[in-house]
């Protein structure tokens, strides 16, 4: 399965692979003729210096032999051989350049496609998957695992083909020099093959553990870098360093274990290789003394020995890369085989105006028996501002996740009379703007962070949204105004500023349904009031859903829905609920005194304006 997955990556590059394979084979086969130039030169020296009548038999094409034999004297022969070798090597190196260029080009094409496919698939995985996966692990799979995989599919695969071509071409040339030496070289191939197979089976498990340990270490690094503020705030550096030390030591120990197996394998391969070289050396000496081989053939045999034996040593490196690629493609396939959230999707794309209806809606996680919502029913009309109030864990955010189709549900949810299950997830999400509790900002300018939800947004649109979100005054104090960089995750902004940027971002998108999931928690009461009143006065009337713990935020809503014990306890306006026994009245009794503060604040604003 893993091998098929690796080879499947080459799909769409068949012609390029065929050309590359031809070049690789030509490169290795043509290299086997290099020793023959030395063989002919030594033979020529023997002829002219020792007055030998014939030059050693050389497996050259006839036209090349004729060219060399046309020379007069040893110096001219050497020049002719050198000239032929230079031209020959120039052709080889020109084709090697094309080969290397094609390898790099094919690898980058496959890497680019695999990275995009993997990244897109990760984007389309469900909310539950992302809640349970380590970010550092995903980053490693999209980066180093992709490089390892594509490196094997192109570079190592061509090396393997080149190895086979070297063995065949080397044996072919050695056949014309001495068949016994050829068979001695080939005889050890089964030993190499069996040793390599055992090595592969052993090292694969080790490399799998190495990858997992590296992934764990990467996760610690990623979490620590992302949470630098928290670490410093609690003076927790020593604990984090100890945690990193432990993961790093675990990764080190597993690498050492892998290196021990590698060392044993390489030592064995070197012993076998050196033994072959020694055997061939002794045999060549015996054959030379007995007149079976001349000096020319002995010199060529030693050079061809390198083509036949030394590439085998590279087999260990190839097996290492092959094993790493097996582990890497397995980790990639583990993600790619995860079903996307769009496996279960609707097909409709109705016009969304903002009417929302829940009828006996219940929800629980698949691995849990406790319901987070139970028989929840309510209606929200187009253009209404509805606030949800409830204790922590009462299901307020769950309602938002259901509305965004992050999870499936029991019962019925309709948008403008159409069942939510029947609407495409992407369509409903493009119609809903959500400001979450912890807004995420990109390392871009203020303008880019606000306009990111609307590619056609102008500066005026962004300024208007910022004005409604009570952010415009803050932006005017920035040295570069709307072109100010906010830093990674908006680190240069305060919590309240980040939330207001997120609010402005949603407003500029002009969605029919806007959701504020505790989105005003980081702003003061006065700013909270100003934002809500600006929302109420804006020209485009969207359906506003506000999740909040503040009664003062909820009290001016058209409708308040009180959640308690995973169900709807009461629905009504502030005056009704404040006088009705239940959770809302209890909360209002605690928070009601803030009402006077609001009135005093507004009086001050009016007096200042006057």
Image: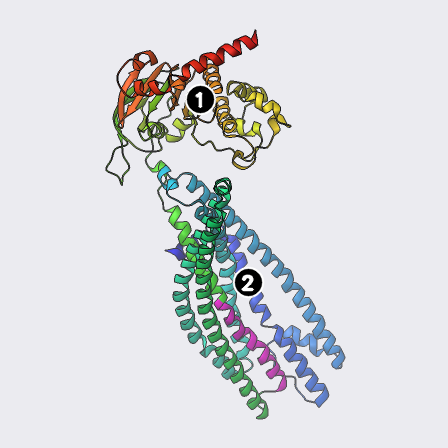
Query: Whole-percent x and y of residue 230?
Result: 48, 40
Instruction: Name the residue tied to disc 1.
Output: 511
Does the magenta portion include 361?
A: no
Q: Residues in magenta?
A: 294-316
Residue at 39 percent of width and 50 percent of height: 333
Of helix, strand and loop, which one carries label 1? loop
Residue 458, position as x, y percentages in the image: 57, 22
Around disc 2, counting alpha carbons within 10 Å, would you say few (fewer than 14), some (14 to 19), or many (20 or more)? Answer: many
Q: How far apart are marks 1 and 2 (CA)?
A: 58 Å
Q: In which quarter of the image is the C terminus?
A: top right
Q: Which mark is residue 24?
A: 2
Residue 538 seen in this snapshot: no
Residue in the foreground of this view, choosing between 287 and 87? 287
Quarter of the image where one finds residue 476: top right
Q: Residue at x 32, y 35 (%)?
A: 344
Quadrant where the N terminus lies? bottom left
Q: Can residue 50 be seen in this view?
A: yes
Depicted 58 relative to depicted 289: above or below: above
Looking at the image, residue 609 lies above or below residue 270: above
């Amino acid at each position: 399965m893993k091998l098929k997955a690796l080879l499947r990556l080459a799909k769409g590059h068949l012609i390029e692979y065929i050309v590359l394979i031809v070049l690789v084979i030509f490169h290795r086969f043509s290299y086997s003729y290099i020793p023959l130039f030395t063989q002919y030169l030594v033979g020529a020296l023997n002829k002219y210096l020792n007055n030998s009548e014939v030059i050693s038999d050389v497996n050259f094409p006839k036209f090349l032999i004729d060219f060399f034999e046309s020379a007069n004297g040893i110096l001219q022969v050497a020049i002719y051989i050198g000239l032929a070798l230079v031209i020959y090597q120039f052709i080889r190196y020109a084709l090697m350049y094309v080969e290397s260029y094609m390898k790099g080009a094919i690898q980058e094409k496959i890497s680019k496609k695999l990275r995009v496919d993997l990244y897109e698939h990760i984007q389309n995985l469900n909310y539950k998957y992302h809640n349970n996966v380590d970010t550092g692990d995903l980053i490693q799979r999209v980066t180093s695992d992709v490089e390892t995989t594509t490196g094997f599919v192109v570079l190592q695969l061509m090396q393997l083909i080149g190895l086979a071509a070297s063995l065949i071409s080397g044996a072919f040339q050695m056949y014309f020099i001495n068949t016994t030496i050829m068979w001695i070289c080939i005889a050890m191939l089964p030993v190499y093959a069996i040793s390599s197979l055992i090595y592969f089976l052993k090292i694969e498990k080790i490399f799998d553990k190495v990858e997992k340990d590296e992934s764990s270490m990467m996760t610690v690094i990623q979490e620590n870098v992302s949470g630098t503020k928290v670490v410093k705030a609690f003076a927790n550096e020593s604990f984090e360093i100890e945690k990193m030390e432990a993961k790093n030591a675990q990764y080190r120990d597993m690498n050492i274990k892998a290196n021990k197996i590698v060392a044993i394998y390489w030592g064995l391969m070197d012993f076998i290789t050196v033994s072959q070289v020694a055997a061939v050396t002794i045999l060549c000496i015996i054959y030379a003394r007995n007149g079976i081989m001349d000096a020319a053939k002995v010199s060529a045999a030693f050079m061809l020995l390198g083509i036949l034996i030394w590439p085998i040593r590279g087999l260990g490196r190839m097996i290492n890369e092959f094993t790493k690629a097996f582990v890497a493609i397995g980790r990639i396939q583990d993600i790619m085989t995860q079903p996307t959230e769009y496996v279960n999707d609707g097909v409709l794309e109705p016009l969304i105006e903002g009417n929302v209806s829940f009828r006996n809606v219940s929800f629980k996680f698949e691995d849990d028996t406790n319901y987070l919502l139970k028989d929840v029913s309510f209606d929200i009309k187009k253009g209404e501002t509805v606030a949800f109030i409830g204790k922590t864990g009462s299901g307020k955010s769950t309602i938002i996740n259901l509305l965004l189709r992050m999870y499936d549900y029991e019962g019925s949810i309709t948008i403008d009379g159409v069942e939510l299950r029947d609407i495409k997830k992407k369509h409903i999400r493009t119609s809903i703007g959500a400001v979450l509790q912890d807004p995420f900002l990109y390392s871009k300018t203020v303008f880019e962070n606000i306009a990111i939800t609307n590619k056609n947004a102008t500066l005026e649109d962004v300024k208007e949204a910022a004005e409604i979100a009570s952010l415009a005054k803050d932006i005017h104090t920035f040295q570069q105004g709307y072109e100010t960089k906010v830093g990674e995750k908006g680190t240069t902004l305060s919590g309240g500023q980040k939330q207001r940027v997120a609010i402005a971002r949603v407003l500029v998108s002009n969605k029919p349904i806007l959701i504020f999931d505790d989105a005003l928690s980081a702003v003061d009461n006065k700013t909270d009031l100003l934002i809500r009143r600006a929302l109420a006065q804006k020209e485009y009337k969207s359906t506003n859903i506000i999740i909040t713990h503040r009664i003062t935020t909820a009290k001016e809503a058209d409708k308040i829905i009180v959640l308690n014990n995973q169900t709807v306890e009461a629905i009504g306006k502030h005056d009704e609920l404040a006088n009705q026994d239940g959770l809302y009245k209890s909360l209002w009794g605690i928070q009601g005194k803030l009402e006077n503060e609001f009135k005093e604040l507004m009086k001050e604003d009016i007096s200042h304006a006057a």
